[in-house]
Amino acid sequence: MSDKGFSLHDALFIGFCATLLVALKGMLRLKLGITGHSMFLICFFYLICYGAVGKAGAISACGMLAGLLAMMLSVGKGGPFILLKFALPAIAMDLCLLILPTLLGLKWRFIMLALVATLAWASKGLIEDLLVGMSIAVALVQFAKSALFGSLFAVFAATLVPPVLQRLRSHDLLDNTELK
Amino acid sequence: MRSLLSTAMAWFLMVIKMWVKRVKTPFFDRSGRDRTSPHYVVRSAKLCALCIVATLCCASGAFFVPNTALIPLLLINAALLGHGRYLGGRVRGLLLLFAIQLLITSMLYLLLHGVERLHEGGLAVTRIMLAIIPGWWLSIVCTPQRIGEVLSWCLPRKWAFVMAASFSLLPYMAKETREIYQMQVMRGANITAKALCYPKHWPELIYCVLYPLLIQLLKLSKQMALAAKLRGFGSHKRPTHWPD
């Protein structure tokens, strides 16, 4: 986890976002029985972090912290592997940001990031399924199902982030003016 | 194979030792006061680090060991499950997860491969559960503070502080979230557990609960950063940890 360029204020905000994500996931327990609903909260908080801090690496830091906290609080019952569930989409989003900023507007950029995060999240499931010995056909069907439902929830969350950032900015709570 | 078995034996002995220790320890201390966390038996940071490493090895083993070595792994996991259950862990969630996974995977195997390969699906789901059980056990035997201390050994100082601050603020955040949520429900927001089953109500959750929370967090992080700097955060090379 690189702390280059983050002020203590930024780092604390990222940490609080990660904590809130894990706490909400534990408290709300949206047991809908639908694959991918966890991508809603994950994408929302990662994109809020990116929008509020506005620095490369903010999403990865949030993902790593959320994974560590989830591991400590046993949210998701994954033990040390829960780290990957939170960290992989975050790292994929940050890598994608290396290309995206110059190409798209904020809303479409968030939607693209959400889709990339969902792909990374679903790929983790695919790799796990293949490692435990599932047949390729079954693993691919599971991957397609996760990617489809996960992307629906992730895109839904991504469309809600710009108005929230706009409101925070209008209350003069965000120092970062780069993202508009 | 021999080294895997010896590691498994060592870990199994450690679990038995902790189990015995737990049996000797009463639920109530001498003053008759109920302990707040009766199931955490690992209170030393070094033992906690050992537990984390063992959990990682065991969970990784679920993915990588051949089918012939699955029996020892199953025995270890059965011991962990029994130990965790004995210490007050809830296995209902694990069983539910296993049942759902088994149902979905079996249906897919039946559809795509027929009955003759159904056992492969069962084996895959069993392996997934073997990867999950050690993590579940870890969360039952180790205190969150000790896991945090172990993690801070390999984290930069600033991020260790952030983790500690976030963790200590968790009760405050949970209280704030609950208060804001209850107030908004009283105002008539469609964010009750039943209403949230419909994704069309989720934007209301964002604007009624998460938005005020984010404002609180932004202010809090600014104040906390200022307070930490005024108290000399970052000026000492070796930060200290609050003891138990």
Image: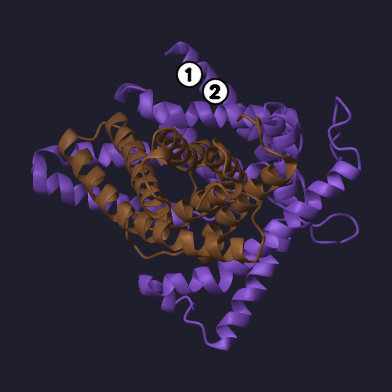
Chain colours: A brown, B purple
- Please name the residue that numbered disc 2 is placed on: B9
Chain letter behind tag 2: B
Mark 2 lies on a secondary structure that is helix
Question: On the rendered structure, is B96 left or right of B221?
Answer: left
Q: Callout 2 environment at 10 Å: few (<14), some (14 to 19), or many (20+)?
A: some
State whether residue A61 is above or below residue B89.
Answer: above
Residue at 36 percent across and 41 percent down: it is A103
Chain letter behind tag 1: B
Mark 1 lies on a secondary structure that is helix
Q: Quadrant of residue B28?
A: bottom right
Q: Specify whether residue A75 is in view.
A: no
Residue at 35 percent across and 56 percent down: it is A155
- Please name the residue that numbered disc 1 is placed on: B5
Question: On the rendered structure, is B137 left or right of B35?
Answer: left
Q: Callout 1 environment at 10 Å: few (<14), some (14 to 19), or many (20+)?
A: few
Residue A136 lies, in percent from the top left, at: 18, 34
Q: CA–CA distance between discs 1 and 2?
A: 6 Å
Residue at 70 percent across and 36 percent down: it is B159
Question: On the rendered structure, is A142 left or right of B145?
Answer: left
Q: Please say if the residues under marks 1 and 2 sit with CB atoms less than 8 Å apart.
A: yes
Q: Quadrant of residue B178?
A: bottom right
Closer-to-camera residue (B78/A81):
A81
Residue A150 lies, in percent from the top left, at: 33, 52
What is the three-letter code of the residue carrying label 2?
Answer: Met
